[in-house]
Image (tube, rainbow, N blue to C red):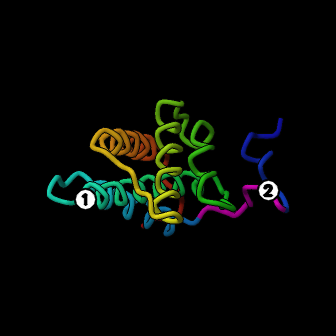
Amino acid sequence: MVSPLENLCGPGRSLQKEPPDAKEFVGLQRSGLTRLRDADHAGLSLEGRFDLAYNAAHALCLAALRWHGYRPGNRYIVFQVLPHTLKLGPEVWRVLAKCHDVRNLGEYEGDLNVDERLVADLITASQAVADALDGLPPLEGVG
């Protein structure tokens, strides 16, 4: 039986197979966790906290995908495949998908419309990703 991730692979598709790299995984996880901690600082602007939390989530989701031996063809796919990479449900990936849309409006149209609730939900979802990622067995080659 072909895995859901394998079904997304191939020329012009959303994923490409690439062996996991332990050093890359550790770097993405470290970057994501650092940004997630920083996003929780109430003294920062709301927009800054959103940016930190979104990029934390992306780094952590990318780490999970790389752990499974795949590289994404676009940013969004790392959120879409969370049910397959970390067994996380819609209560997590829907928040991250919404925040991806908000991020794109801010990046490409200058309309970053965030509030305290969205940032809090994003931080909660990102922490769920971090916790699930922490439960993965270590990759070989990590010293």
Q: Is residue 127 above or below residue 53?
A: above
Which residue, given by chain and number where applicable, does mark 1 sit on? 38
Under mark 1, the amino acid is: Asp
> What residue appears at the point 62 percent right and 43 percent down from the top-left corner?
81
> What residue appears at the point 48 percent right and 65 percent down from the top-left corner?
107
Under mark 2, the amino acid is: Arg
The image quadrant that residue 14 belongs to is: bottom right
Start-end of magenta stretch: 12-20
> What residue appears at the point 57 percent right and 41 percent down from the top-left corner?
82
User: Which element is circle 2 on?
Assistant: loop
| Percent coordinates x, y for residue 37 in the rendering | 26, 55
The image quadrant that residue 32 belongs to is: bottom left
Residue 88 shown in magenta: no
Decide if residue 26 is on the left or right side of residue 62.
Answer: left
Q: Of 34 and 113, which appears nearest the observer?
A: 113
Residue 18 shown in magenta: yes
